[in-house]
Amino acid sequence: MPFNEILILLMFASFIGLLMTGFPVAWVLGGVGVLFAIAGYYSDLYLDTFTGIDFLTLGLVVNRIFKIMDNWILVALPMFIFMGNMLDKSGAAENLMKSFQELFGRVRGGLAITVILIGIILAASTGIIGASVVLLAVISLPAMRKQGYSDQVALGTIASSGTLGILIPPSIMLVIMADQIGLSVGDLFMGAVFPGLLLGALYIIYILASGYFRPKTMPLPVATEPVTFALWMRVIKATLPTMMLVLLVLGSIFAGFATPTEASGVGAAAAILLALFNRRLSWSVFKECLYNTFNVSGYIFAIFIGASLFALVLRELGGDEFIESFLTSLPFGPYGIVLFILAFIFLLGFLLDWIEITLIVLPLVAPVISALDIVIEGYGVIDNPELVWFVMLVAVTLQTSFLTPPVGFALFYLKGVCPADISLSTIYKGVFPFILLQLIGLMLILMFPALVNWFPAFIYQ
């Protein structure tokens, strides 16, 4: 095996091993990149190898960092994060919870369906997983336990509904994916609409089926209000402000009136107005939202810098060619290679956060997908329809990483606000059926690419 390939394998092994030590991911990525740049340089100097690494490699990182900070698309990240934090404080979710619970009170599992629907609405207006999971847990878990729901059903519903925000636009993950492989953010946002709604529909079908076959896990409330015109008006009144925010942000992008970056700024301002309308805005709330925004944005951009250094050294060592030759040499057809990549990303999700996978793995495998003999319908208007479809498959796969132990962040967000008598193992058991549902959704998108590409093509036409 060539020395370059040995270094490539050692880079990945060192990265995974150092993650287990608990060091911050950004430091691990950058540190491994520096160490293997030095290893490549001195191996060329003293071992007469030809890795092609020199100290100019580290100098190139300065240019990479400048490009990250100068990237207009990435301005949308802190804006969307702030919008989600402000919406979390606006009281919109509590109003939705109360009105939807009254609407679905006569349906077995109606409270769980309410949580899923609110999760979809929050996903379309925040895109922040931590905020969605914590908010859903705080406002719905006590009511679900009081009504007699089993802890596993309640916890699984809350965790899975909260993770929809990483897929349904405006998703910060899709913004980063578009930037990494040069796709249109608008294409990915529009392509994610049906896959996100598909997962929500699968969740609701599962809840209805579970209520029918296992009624003891989700009993009906003792007393429910009849569905009247007045009740419908309360539901519309509670839903309208949030849906107007969604329409303002996504509608302006889909209609071509604004870029995602411009729409993110408008959405952040609209979230402030919504909190003001609901009388939830104060200086302390504003400061808390700003602090959370700076904290999450700093975390993401620190990983950006570390991942840029890691990826640069990996490419200098020939990592692109090594991975491409490995994947294309597999004894599978084109779709078999796609399934292999998705399975690999699914397993990585047990150990890594979606940010590292997006920044490191996605740019390495995207050229392989472009080179495969896969033809996906673009309806004459979508550029790179194969990549748009593949990125959506990766996005759905990465959504499962929030629910898979041991590094499922949604599980830890949920555990942090649960009563002390709820164990982490109960949460694991609760999310397991929803992981299977996500994998079913993934297979449907794999088999029917129109679920991704039809909507963007329809909008453009």
Image (cartoon, helix red, strand yellow):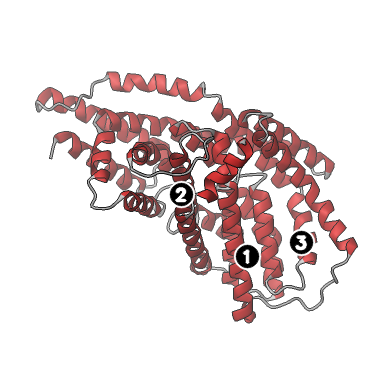
Residue pictured at 23% horizontal, 21% vertical: 54
Count of labels in the image:
3
Residue pictured at 75% horizontal, 59% vertical: 97
| Amino acid beneath label 2 | Leu
Rate crowding at label 1 as few (under 14), some (14 to 19) or many (20 or more) other CA atoms within 10 Å.
Answer: many
Badge 2 or badge 3: first in the primary sequence: 3
How many angstroms separate mark 1 from mark 2 (CA)?
21 Å
Rate crowding at label 3 as few (under 14), some (14 to 19) or many (20 or more) other CA atoms within 10 Å.
Answer: many
Q: Percent from the top left, x then y, of residue 338?
A: 36, 49
- The residue sitting at the front extreme is 380
Residue pictured at 71% horizontal, 59% vertical: 139
| Element under disc 2 | helix
Residues under numbered marks 1 and 2 in contact, where contact means CB atoms less than 8 Å apart: no
Q: Is residue 449 above or below residue 255?
A: below
| Element under disc 1 | helix
For mark 2, what is the residue? 393
Badge 1 or badge 2: first in the primary sequence: 1
For mark 1, what is the residue? 204
**Numbered badge on residue 100:** 3
Q: Is residue 419 at least partly visible in the picture?
A: no
- Depth check, mark 2 against mark 3: the one in front is 2
| Element under disc 3 | helix
In which quarter of the view is residue 26 placed?
top left
In which quarter of the view is residue 365 placed?
top left
